Image: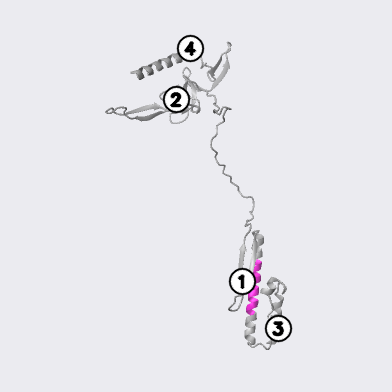
Amino acid sequence: MATMMTSLQSSFTSLSISSNSSFLGQRLLSPISLSAASPVTPVFEILVLIKDIATRILFISLLGFAMHLSFQKNGLAFLMLSRPAVGGGSLITLLFFWNSLQVKPTGNPCLVFAKLKRWERKKCKPNSLPILHKMHVKFGDTVKVISGRDTGKIGEVTKIFTHNSTIVIKDVNLKTKHMKSREEGEPGQILKIEAPIHSSNVMLYSKEKEVVSRVGHKVLEDGQKVRYLIKTGELIDTVEKWKQLKEAKDKETSQVAAASAS
């Protein structure tokens, strides 16, 4: 029996991982003295020694696992050992404080970047007015709608809004408008008005060849700059056409003034 106790004590001493002067040596690995004059029985001493050895083996396993996690996750691990005031054995508490928990990526990760849409800002001139882009259509042009709900419709440009590059075409893109009665007893009205359409949704139309075409610019022999249809060569800006448009506009203005006066 004494030989078995001596061998167990020597095996326990070989499991020490630090000296008695270190933190672990003072708290955990202090040698246990077994004397023949002890009042407890030898069997009880053997059981206590076996329990302490098992506790130390468990401690070493947990310490190795903690170090493994610390190196793998690039973190910092703290180990605290304490003995309870009542009862036997040791209480092992592992407190892990991860400083920079970063999992090392395997292979080439797929990075997806979402670009945030900024508020639309228009380029302005030094006087803070927006820079207006030149439009390929003008008042009085015959155009054909090539995109949108009214695709294929042909009409004449009656209004131009240069600040947002939209145009109004006669009898195209009609919207319903409800008007309230102006006087008591007078019924309201439901009108059809022409809503603006963006100029990029139309192309100039040739009534003679019945085709759409892009617009070109050239200078005539007399030095006049005109627009023409690239596909047909037909001139768009002519003196006769401008005279007709001016007369029609003056006539419409006079009619509106007469209606408002009455």
Circles 2, 1 touching at the beta carbon (< 8 Å)? no
Using the image, tell me which numbered label, if any, was put on residue 92.
1
Using the image, tell me which numbered label, if any, was put on residue 168.
2
Query: Where's residue 255, x and y in %?
Result: 37, 17
Magenta stretch secondary structure, dominant: helix
The first of marks 3 and 4 along the sequence is 3
Query: Where's residue 79, x and y in %?
Result: 64, 67
Circles 3, 4 touching at the beta carbon (< 8 Å)? no
Q: Of helix, strand and loop, which one carries label 4? A: helix
Chain part drawn in magenta: 50-64
Q: Nearer the viewer, residue 144 or 51?
A: 51
Query: Where's residue 167, x and y in %?
Result: 47, 25
The first of marks 1 and 4 along the sequence is 1
Using the image, tell me which numbered label, if any, was put on residue 240.
4
Q: Is residue 46 left or right of residue 197?
A: right
Q: Of helix, strand and loop, which one carries label 2? A: strand
Amino acid under disc 4: Glu
- Label 1 vs label 3: CA separation? 27 Å
Magenta stretch: includes residue 54: yes
- Label 2 vs label 1: CA separation? 83 Å
* Residue under pointer 3: 6
